[in-house]
Every structure is written in structure tokens, then in C-alpha cells.
Amino acid sequence: MPEGPSVRRFHHLVSPFVGQQVVKTGGSSKKLNPAGLQLLWLQDAQVHGKKLFLRFDPDEEIVCPRSSPLSEPLHDEEHMEEARHHQEVSDLPSQSAGGAHVVPSGDDGPPQCVGGDSPAGGAERWLQVSFGLFGSVWVNEFSRAKKANKKGDWKDPIPRLVLHFGGGGFLAFYNCQMAWSCSSPVVSPASDILSEKFHRGQALEALGRDQPVCYTLLDQRYFSGLGNIIKNEALFRAGIHPLTPGSLLGALRLEALVDHVVAFSAGWLEGKFQGRQQHTQIYQKDRCPAGHQVVKEALGPPGGLQRLTWWCPQCQPRLPAAGPEQVQPP
């Protein structure tokens, strides 16, 4: 799924429509009834880690969007370019149909109650948007096919949801899952890698545990918004083998790893505002910048999600069980 910098871009594309009424809807979503959004007012938009939250209300009275550091742009003065062209892929695994149910919120703190195909009653109606691998948001235009499919047909991707607003513009959401939440998003900015309130101490404590650092980096409780690309790039830049237990790394190495996570993420986001394509050094590469052969393997905790991981055995040597950075007992 898109990582923190990409979802923040989506938030910037949506934000200009806050305060406008939805006058027409469309889209292919079967888990959400697009017609249920007609005549509602978009009152707020927030981004938390890898998820986008949109608040809709039947009343015209505008509720001032809360000043969340996770929702604030890093570069307000920059005008946003058009969303990158992504070709839509298949749905994420679908949730069970029917009434509301509780699902883990991952990077968003406590579990949230989501479900139903139309907004529930009550003062707040939050639409939670989780993007698939090539999920995207388009403004005032639709995504077009870049190549023919396996059958040789040039079929444009079909948006999951289209929202036309009273101001004349529209938003198109592609390759995403949407569900109504029964409460406002609850999140601590301390875990968000792009927040000014990102808690380095909390992140360092988590990384120092006796488990491979590549597992910990993808734990959204401590590194909300961090995904597979950032994981690979930060580990390479820090010269750390992905399977190195954090307990074997000294404080300076862990600090350097967190520095690379933050710097790479911020640079990625800045590049999006400036229209620059993100360049990686190790992710999906055959050789590292030094010319060494890169290793690719699916890594993940036992019984958990296995993610493709790229690393250079020479630039990122694996430490022995009693590595030089391990603090030996007296």
C-alpha cells in the first residue's frame, strides 16, 4: 500500500474540497454505497500513517478542522502537482459484509468500529480510506490506461468512488477500501514518522528489542506511515543487515537508523511536491551503488506477513550472535 509520504500527498489533493457539498457520486465500490454520500458536506480531512480519514456531515455548518500535526502540510506554499498516474490493481482482501465489526486499527491506536455501506447516525461520520498497492487519488480527471491488459484491451481503471462537489470539481479514488467509522480517528502523532511530534525515544526503545530490525520498522505502532520502500532504503543507508536483532546494535547505530528513516521519508514527500520522482539505492535494484550484487528475499515474523527485502551482503554485513556492538555482561 502507499506509504506515509504518498498518503500525505493524497490528503493535500483532498483538502481544497473541505467545506463543499457532494452533489453527485459514482464508482464501483460494492462495500460502500456511493449514493449515501450525496448532499453530504465534506467537513474535515486527516491523514494518519497510511490511512486517510474524511468527515462528512449532512449540515452546512462548517466544523473547523482540528489542527492535527498529522494533517498539516510540510510545505504549505507549494502547489500540488497532478497525482501520479497509477494503473489500478485488484482489490485488497475484502472484509466480511454485513453489520459493523471491530478491526485492529494498526497505526491508528485502539480498534475502531467500522462497517456498513452508508453513514451511521450521530454527529460524526468518518470515512476511513485504506489504499491498495497502486491506490491513488485523482483531481478533476480520471486515470487512463498506460498499456494493454493481458487480453490486449486498453481499459481504463475504474474508480472505487467518485465525488462531484458543488464548487464544480471532483475527486476520484482508485484501488482502495472504504468503511464508515463510528468514531473520530484516534491517533498519537508520536508514532508518525512525518510528524513534528514523532517520538524518537519510543522508536529507539522498540528498535532495541531482541528481534530483527526489519520486523520492528514495519510495526505501525512505532513507525506509522513506514512501508517496505522506506524500510529497505533506511537499512541500506544505515549499513544494517535487515535480520540484525536490534539488541545487537549500539545506541549510535540505532540513532542513525532512525535518522535515515526520517530523512528519507521527508525527502520523499518534498520530492512529491516538487514533481521529482523518488530514486532508490537498494529497493528493487540488482546492484547497490557500489556495484555489489544485491540479495532479495521475503522476510517477516513467523506466521506474519512476509515482505520482499533487498540488501547488500557487503555493505550490510550480518553481525554474529556476539557481534562487536553487543554489550557484554561484566
Image (tube, rainbow, N blue to C red):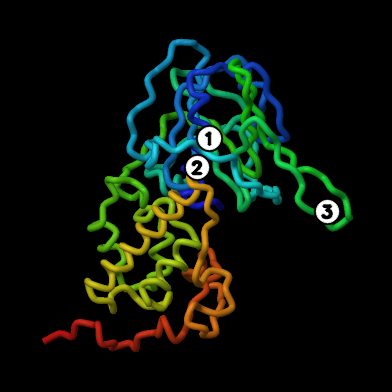
Residue 128 picture location, percent across and down: 52, 36
Instruction: Specify few, some or many for label 2: CA neighbours under 10 Å numbering under 14, 14-19, or 20 or more.
Output: many
Q: Residue at x 88, y 55 (%)?
A: 151
Spatial distance from mark 3 to mark 2, Cα to Cα? Answer: 28 Å
Image disc number at residue 9:
2
Instruction: Verify CB contact (< 8 Å) between mark 2 and mark 1.
Output: yes
Viewer-closest of 7 and 213: 7
Q: Residue at x 45, y 61 (%)?
A: 230
Callout 1 amino acid: Leu
Viewer-closest of 177 and 93: 177
- 144 vs 17, left or right, is right
- 206 vs 313, left or right, is left
Image disc number at residue 13:
1
Callout 3 amino acid: Ala
Callout 2 amino acid: Arg
Q: Secondary structure at mark 3?
A: loop
Residue 298 picture location, percent across and down: 56, 73
